Amino acid sequence: MTTVTGDRLEDVWATRPGLVGWLGAVNHKQVGQRFIATAFVFFLVGGVQSLFMRYQLGSPESTFLDPETYNQLFTMHGTTMMFLFAVPIGEAFGIYFVPLMLGARDMPFPRLNAFGYWAYLFGGIFLYSSFLAGSVPDSGWYAYPPLSGPEYSPRSNLDFWLLGVTFVEVSGVIAAFEIVVLILRFRAPGMAISRMPLFVWSLLVTATMILVAFPPLIMGTVLLELDRKVGTGFYDPAVGGDPMLWQHIFWWFGHPEVYIILLPAIGIVSAILPVFTRTRIVGYTFIAAATVAIGILSFGVWVHHMFTTGINLLGLTFFTAGSLLITIPGGVQIFAFIATLWRGRPVFKPPLLHVIGFLVVFVFGGLSGVMVASVPFDWQAHDTYFVVAHFHYVLIGGVLFPVLAGLTYWLPKMTGRLLDDRLGTVAFWLLFAGFNLTFLPQHVVGLLGMPRRVYTYPSGIGWDVYNLLSTVGAFVVAAGMAVFVADVVRSRWRGAPAGDDPWGGNTLEWATTSPPEPFNFRVIPIATTRDPLWDERPLDLAGGPAWRRELAHPVVSRREMVSTSVLDAAPHEVLTLPIHSLWPLGLAAALGVFLIGVMVDRTSIGLVGLAGLAVCVIGWLWSRQDEP
Amino acid sequence: MTAGPAGEFDLDLPPPGRIAGRATGWWGMVTGLVALASMHSTLLFAHVYLAARAQAWPPAGTDAPGLVPASIATAVLMLSGVAGAVAHSAAGTGGTRRLQAATAVTALLGAVFVTLAVGDLRGLELEMRAHVYDATFVVFWAFAVFMIAIGIAGLVFIQFQLWGARLDQRQRLLAVNAALWWYFAIGCWLAVYGTLYLGAGVWR
């Protein structure tokens, strides 16, 4: 609920009152907060699923879960963590913080941004509604045919997966092109591309990768859904199709996705390290170049997921080389981070602890990645718990620790309240110890031959103790997460006031209030160095050209933002942005209705959805919605 | 002018009409088209992959599609591309009437193309369930024609927007984006034409 203040800038950027105002909000901070909160809820749900699985595997021949339920749980756990948490959380950080770091007031297309969130939420709900329908996806998070095809999955469980994932992917693509345009066109005047924060570099590369990597999966899922609903045979050898086609399409998306998940996390680390070591980052140019190199090379490694599928020798050689090559830019980044730690004066508060947790765990996962990049080793370890351990080291090390570092670092900016250092430290050590206790033994049990995706195992073959340790570790991780969540909840009411800049930050988000005003910056900042708050504190927020004064004290009630040139960020023009819109919600709802029609084979429902889509698109394009 | 470590730069806005770079909406359209091109490339990859692994493509007993109807349709579409380029130019510097006329011609030629292409497809009597060749053909074809149909809808939308209105900056941008879409849709079709029609004998 907002009140009219008499300040035109405040009034025009305020969210409209009531439920309609909330539903029609398009500001990047509201959308970003919703993304972060929703992704975190999905993360907790996916985490609870893993606890059920670990409890089942904690002892041999357990009957806690039946095989069917176990299949559903590992499918939904993987799907949730990859599609509903890991990718969206990176983009969510981008949506919330990149405009602040760039000195911008909002995303370039706020209505599209809001649509991205609603599509993500509805896609997640669509996937989870499979539990209500009693038809939960159970073919793994990669849904390989023929297991996922009409013959072996005749019920609607895979339709929930295919349509829900498509919905979520659409959201990811939309957020990506918002982020690309934002970074290219809405940086603070003076922030040439060579001065962008490394977090922004990582988001630019990530978003560009999403634009190339996600659409093929959307197309691949459409083809699989056609196989299931229409009876085509793209993946069916009986009519000339090939199940390997799915694997190529899926991993063309799936391996870049690992870096799509990882690069924002690298960006978070790059943002936190200089602040908590009180020194400039070592090797800015090298880290940025390595980020771009990873983005390119990540499209040349997908077949290493398919080493056991009969690929010819030339293919094996090429993709082994690609998989090994990508460790070079990865290594450049890690060495630059270590050098920054070495050169600086580390302040061991929870954000830095999580960063160090990232360095240790991720490097360990990277080393086991080099092992499985080697074909002879991969043939032995493929589909064993060694691979499960490897990718959890990469993904939890590469994503969860940096995300928690990012939350402890930026949450004070979002809420205006500090988290508790002691609780944060306890949470970190529980997570770090619990994580290693969970996944380190899985390397061993994998090498002993325990395959992935088995719901139980016989006793007396040497796997019992490792599985028990893993299960104990998983519950320690859960305890660590519980402490972290309790700290976040506690800080909301009892956290010490954060002030505008509790850490002595170097980037522009720390130049505004905590939480930021709806318009982010009354006076658009000018950035002429890579660490503007370290080099120019206090920022020059007075004077300047006429447009700067007019944006600070607008003469018309419009949301205005200045666009800048792509390379050197020279001011280009002042643009107006939409204030409020229900079209994004309507469009996402119509898309949901259409997908439900496809799901239940009801043409009438599908047509209603299509009609809704047409109405919303026309209404959206016809209206400007940039006037109160 | 403001001084920074990298030298001085101008903080003033350039006068309207003298902006050196592209509009924000242009960047939005281009990035969106990159995503769609990636989808289209997936279909192209699927076609090539399946064809390369098949013993015969089209399968034995299936004739390669005739070139004449598709070539006529393609020629019409290329003509519409010329009209689209005129609309593109009019959106930048021309007046309302020129833009209206060019978009109308583009949409009309696009509609003729769709009619010809649909007629051609019906004549091929493909059965999507019978063989993956037929299914690949139809889906690859449908993606391109769907892009063209959306382009026609966009051009019609612009016609409505221009009805009795003065051409403002937003409408110009909309028209430029419609032209970009049209070029993309033509590109999609040319990939289909080149692969499914001209290249039909490559895999035999």
Image (spheres, rainbow, N blue to C red):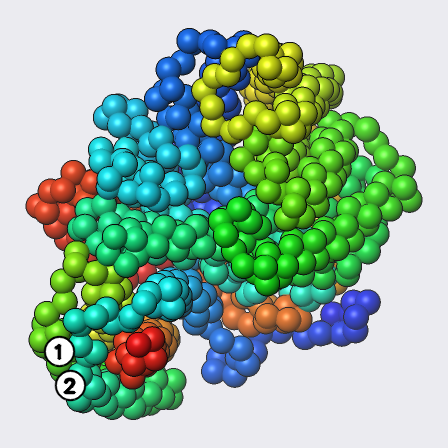
Of residues A430 and A613, which is closer to you in this image? A430
Of residues A509 and A604, which is closer to you in this image? A604
According to the image, label 2 marks what residue? Answer: B69
Q: Is residue B45 left or right of residue A280?
A: left
SS category of the residue bearing label 1: helix
Image spot of residue B86 (x, y percent): 31, 90
Residue drawn at x 17%, y 51% as measured from the top left: A230
Q: Which mark is residue B164?
A: none
Residue drawn at x 16%, y 38% as measured from the top left: A600
The picture quadrant where one finds residue A527 is bottom right
3D distance between C-alphas at marks 1 and 2: 6 Å
According to the image, label 1 marks what residue? Answer: B120
Image spot of residue A99 (x, y percent): 57, 52
Question: Looking at the picture, which amino acid does disc 2 mark?
Answer: Pro
The picture quadrant where one finds residue A289 is bottom right
Image spot of residue A304 (x, y percent): 57, 50
